Amino acid sequence: MNASVAIQVLPHVDTDEEVIRIVDEVIAYIKSTGLTYYVGPCETAIEGEYEELMEIVKNCQYIAIKAGCPKVAAYVKISFAPEGGVLTIEKKVTKHHI
């Protein structure tokens, strides 16, 4: 694993229920990738190989549009170490959730 990303998908829709429905579809897609991920209240973190993660980030926008929102924004944070060695989700958050 040489990268991790945190992505917050913000569908431009009229109701909170629609936001939740669309974000849930994006999270279901992330889950389907088989990568390690962590859903937080404002963003989802995913770890893996850089190129694969960039493809997932791109696809998250398409998933949201396909789910019915006419416009989507996303905030993305990227940690990339080409030779490996980025901190894992487990190391970052496990101690806070015991």
Image (cartoon, grey):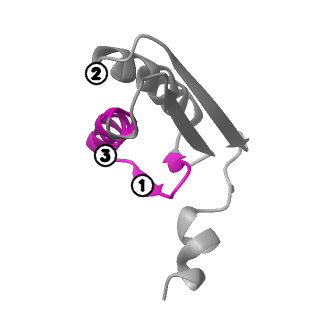
Task: Tell me which residue sits at (29%, 35%) in the image.
Answer: 25
Residue 28, position in %: x, y?
Answer: 28, 41
Task: Tell me which residue sits at (42%, 21%) in the image.
Answer: 59
The 10 Å Cα crowd at callout 3, few under 14, some 14 to 19, many 20 or more, is some
C-alpha span from label 3 to label 1: 8 Å
What amino acid type is highlighted by mark number 2?
Answer: Ala
Choose between 11 and 40: the one closer to the eye: 11
The 10 Å Cα crowd at callout 2, few under 14, some 14 to 19, many 20 or more, is some
C-alpha span from label 2 to label 3: 16 Å
- The label nearer to you, 3 versus 1, is 3
Q: Is residue 31 magenta?
A: yes
Q: According to the image, label 3 marks what residue? A: 31
Query: Measured along the vertical axis of the image, is residue 90 above or below residue 87?
Result: below
Q: According to the image, label 2 marks what residue? A: 67
Region in magenta? 18-47
What amino acid type is highlighted by mark number 3?
Answer: Lys
Q: According to the image, label 1 marks what residue? A: 36
Under tag 2, what secondary structure?
loop
Under tag 1, what secondary structure?
strand
